[in-house]
Image: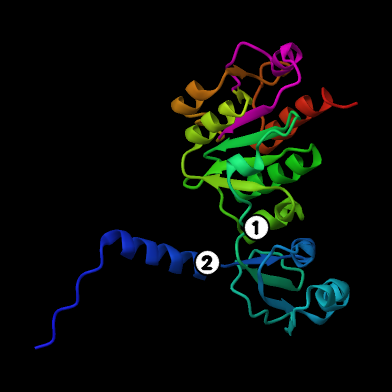
Amino acid sequence: MAPRDKKKPQWVVDKEKARRDGGDETLWLFGLHAVRDALRNPVRTRLRLVVTRNALDKLQADIDAAGITPELADPRNFPVPLDPQSVHQGAALEVRPLDWGSVSEICATRGDAPLVLLLDRVTDPHNVGAILRSAEVFGARAVIAPHRHSAPETGALAKTASGALERQPYLRVQNLANAMRALKEMGYFIIGLDGTAEADLGEVLDKLPPVATALVLGAEGPGLRHLTTETCHTLAKIRFAGEFGSLNVSNAAAVGLYEVARRRAP
């Protein structure tokens, strides 16, 4: 009688499953801008490119430079698993998610005063895409969000980001409060944006010396979680006129980034 196989330890099973899940995870980027920027990104792992003849003509130089062989498709029967409302413009690229590295690697201060953005449960990919675009424009070192209850890297996010996803580090962490504590240890001053705060963001920034700064934004409606609020150094609001003081989270991010960036302009 053959000996019974020993049962694998649970940690081995979990590790093998994580490896399989990570290795099999892919997403489809769509739209001319998102596909073009992914083709130009040397660290992006590209698996399959599907284009119509019209899109091929527009992307030919980047396709040749990337060294990928495209599949020609009929625009009336585009063979890619996209949402029917997705405006693909005749181009879709299957890729693996980007790995930017850790918070300590990306956000470490190097004799400078970097700017970082943290998102607390912002789940709408269109909002996150717009935030990544603003973060790139205003020179943020990274955008950080929790792995759970945040928008993952998707085609919709990439299209809204209009190429910024390929250039702006988007770090998804296991625990946002732990990431905030790590930033504190690196010398960051952390400001939570809260419409009910007494201090104005501009006033808080005016009192700060040149220092690494992190802005934290919460989901529209619930706002910042209690632990997130407690982990901030201070809270501040964006000044508003009249009685209406609520901004879409992506607009609030853009205003906050601008307020920090303009004080650092030479």
Q: Is residue 23 above or below residue 241?
A: below
Sequence-earlier tag: 2 or 1? 2
Q: Residues within 10 Å of mark 2 (few under 14, many from 20)?
A: few
Towards the viewer: 33 or 139? 139
Identify the image quadrant of residue 262. Answer: top right
Q: Which mark is residue 78?
A: none
Q: Secondary structure under badge 2?
A: loop
Q: Looking at the picture, how far across and down is residue 178, in whole percent?
A: 48, 34
Q: Which residue is mark 1?
A: 156
Instruction: Tell me the magenta residue range.
Output: 194-218
Which mark lies nearer to you, 2 or 1?
2
Above or below 133: residue 9: below
Q: Amino acid at mark 1?
A: Ala
Q: Does residue 204 show up magenta in the picture?
A: yes
Q: Which residue is mark 2?
A: 25
Tell me the quarter of the picture where residue 142 sits: top right
- State the residue at coordinates (61%, 21%): 195
Measured along the vertical axis of the image, is residue 224 above or below residue 198?
below
Q: CA distance from mark 2 to mark 1?
A: 16 Å
**Along the line of sight, which residue is nearer the eye, 248 or 47?**
47
> Callout 1: few (<14), some (14-19), or many (20+) C-alpha neighbours within 10 Å?
many
Q: Position of residue 79 (x, y in %)?
A: 64, 80
Residue found at the very far left of the displayed protein: 1
